[in-house]
Image (cartoon, rainbow, N blue to C red):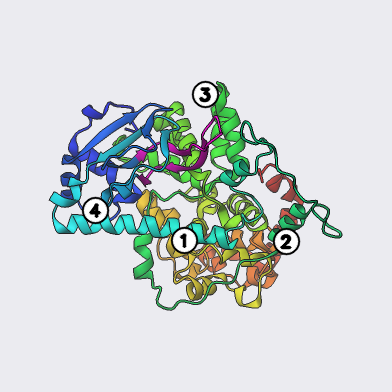
């Protein structure tokens, strides 16, 4: 499908390999996927096609393998339906038909050309018990996730309590149904010092932090690992997404490939998806692709734009760090700055490494996005960090069950990133434990410290010059780069910090935030 071939031209083995990368099918083995494909039907749905129609009755449910659909609801007195939500790759819909024959409660319409699997309920009644259990488990996970999201929205814990839902906006529309008069509304008393009450409520929403999650010692790496899926929808820097979307609306995206590559390389998730596509079985590469420019050469600019557009579209419904802008902006700035400082260190020290140090730095904290999806209340605490959060790795283990380095490795393994990126994710806080790729690990560890010292981090800086001086990374560099053995580390740190001050505006000035 990613290669643009017709469905009938893709053999069963390739279909199985493709489904393995879809979130819904994580944990299904080849035999189960083969059995599933034999009783399901592929649909290639053009944009704006109605897949499910409200008030109709049918027993089929659907799995969105690639693309995007929107859920719409028609209201009395309204000419146009309202959009309730959007669903992206890996989502399922219409699954209530599996257990009940109630009428459909909304329309589901393809927003873009989409590839969908239509499944009749016989898949459950005729399949083996293990396949049935896996399907029911997936449905339960989906329903629980949706219920949890609904509860958070009702409780005002997802950072969106100041923003009315689409349905609320429609019901509060000033235009009454035809033939009815607008009811009179009592005057609203403004809140002193904050103007209109909705602004006051919004101000309180920005200030208020969600409750700190409880320490759950029952959560272990073994339990959390299955929850990390390579096709999970992760948030994209909205400023980068906006610039890319504007660029790709016309023909400029095809013409200005250098700018396209540069913008993709400013976001960890987009970079990962592009590299993942280049390393997919569709392109049958003997050597692993590890950079965005090379991926664009292998895959082609047009296909890369489709991957980027799909990733941005899917990420629209995913909010990073519960919408706390200081944390999300700090995360995205930190990622780019660490990559650039790592390159700067390489050039100053004049040490050679085959790994792309910029991407090593850009992706080193990717696991934070994974853990944010598991424990969305944790990272917003960095807007007002307590002493307990000074050691982020220890705090992640205590409150979530695993640190972001390990979570990043799980995701990177599923995506198929080269080994240096995995080692940097795993050991950038503990370079002394790196047995492979020690130089990239050391460079990103030092870049991480320098970036945090300059304030490019989540919350307030938690490191000092002493952390830079005491880092084990200097020993790794001296071990693998003999000329550096004659260098005074304290003198080098002070000199590099001074050079960093001079170059800081250039390092941070072009990062969209």
Q: Quadrant of residue 166?
A: top right
Instruction: Judge the density around disc 1: few (<14), some (14-19), many (≥20) Cα neighbours within 10 Å.
Output: few
Of the image marks 1 and 3, the number of the one nearer the N terminus? 1
Q: Secondary structure at mark 4?
A: loop
Residue tagged 1: 148
Going by the image, does 383 lie left or right of 320? right
Going by the image, does 486 lie left or right of 367? right
Distance in Å between CA atoms under marks 3 and 2: 44 Å
Of the image marks 4 and 2, the number of the one nearer the N terminus? 4
- Please determine whether, in this image, residue 152 is positioned above or below residue 315: below
Q: Tell me residue 106's x, y (percent).
A: 42, 40
Q: Tell me residue 160's x, y (percent).
A: 61, 54
Do tag 4 and tag 2 residues touch (Cβ < 8 Å)? no
Residue tagged 3: 254
- Please determine whether, in this image, residue 422 is positioned above or below residue 507: below
Going by the image, does 270 lie left or right of 57? right
Relative depth, front residue between 235 and 48 = 48
Residue tagged 4: 28
Residue tagged 2: 204
Distance in Å between CA atoms under marks 4 and 2: 45 Å
Q: Which residues are magenta?
A: 65-93
Of the image marks 4 and 3, the number of the one nearer the N terminus? 4
């Amino acid at each position: 499908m990613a290669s643009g071939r017709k469905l009938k031209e893709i053999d069963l083995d390739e279909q199985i390999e493709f489904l393995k990368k879809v979130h819904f099918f994580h944990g299904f083995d080849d035999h189960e996927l083969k059995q599933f494909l034999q009783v399901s039907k592929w649909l290639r749905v053009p944009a704006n096609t109605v897949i499910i129609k409200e008030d109709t009755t049918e027993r089929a449910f659907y799995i969105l393998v690639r693309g995007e659909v929107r859920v719409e609801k028609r209201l009395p007195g309204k000419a146009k339906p309202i959009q309730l939500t959007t669903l992206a790759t890996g989502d399922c819909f219409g699954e209530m038909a599996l257990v009940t024959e109630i009428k459909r409660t909304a329309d589901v319409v393809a927003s873009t050309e989409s590839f969908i699997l239509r499944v009749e309920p016989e898949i459950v009644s005729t399949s083996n018990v293990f396949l049935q259990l896996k399907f029911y488990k997936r449905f339960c996970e989906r329903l629980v996730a949706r219920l949890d999201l609904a509860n958070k929205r009702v409780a005002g814990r997802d950072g969106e309590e100041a923003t009315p839902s689409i349905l609320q906006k429609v019901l509060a529309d000033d235009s009454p149904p035809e033939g009815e008069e607008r009811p009179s509304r009592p005057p609203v008393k403004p809140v002193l010092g904050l103007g209109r009450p909705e602004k006051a409520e919004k101000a309180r929403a920005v200030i208020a932090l969600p409750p700190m999650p409880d320490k759950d010692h029952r959560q272990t790496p073994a339990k959390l690992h299955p929850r990390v899926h390579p096709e999970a929808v992760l948030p994209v820097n909205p400023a980068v997404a906006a610039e890319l979307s504007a660029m790709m609306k016309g023909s400029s995206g095809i013409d200005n490939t250098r700018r396209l590559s540069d913008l993709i390389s400013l976001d960890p998730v987009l970079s990962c998806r592009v590299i993942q596509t280049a390393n997919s079985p569709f392109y049958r590469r003997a050597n692993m692709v590890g950079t965005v420019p090379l991926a664009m050469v292998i895959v082609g600019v047009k296909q890369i734009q489709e991957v980027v557009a799909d990733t941005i579209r899917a990420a629209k419904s995913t909010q990073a760090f519960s919408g706390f802008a200081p944390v999300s902006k700090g995360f995205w700035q930190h990622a780019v700055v660490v990559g650039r400082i790592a390159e700067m260190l390489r050039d100053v020290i004049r040490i050679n490494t085959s790994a792309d140090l910029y991407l090593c730095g850009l992706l080193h904290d990717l696991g934070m996005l994974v853990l944010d999806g598991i424990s969305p209340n944790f990272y917003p605490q960095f807007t007002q960090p307590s002493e307990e959060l000074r050691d982020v790795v220890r705090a992640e283990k205590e409150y979530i069950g695993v640190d972001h380095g390990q979570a990043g490795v799980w995701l990177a393994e599923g995506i198929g990133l080269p080994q240096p990126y995995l080692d940097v994710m795993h050991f950038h806080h503990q370079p002394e434990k790196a047995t492979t790729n020690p130089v990239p690990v050391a460079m990103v560890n030092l870049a991480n410290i320098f970036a945090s010292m300059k304030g490019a981090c989540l919350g307030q800086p938690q490191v000092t010059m002493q952390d830079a001086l005491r880092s084990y990374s200097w020993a790794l560099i001296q071990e693998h780069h003999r000329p550096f053995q004659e260098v005074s580390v304290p003198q080098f740190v002070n000199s590099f910090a001074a050079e960093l001050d001079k170059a800081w505006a250039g390092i941070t000035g072009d990062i969209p935030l």
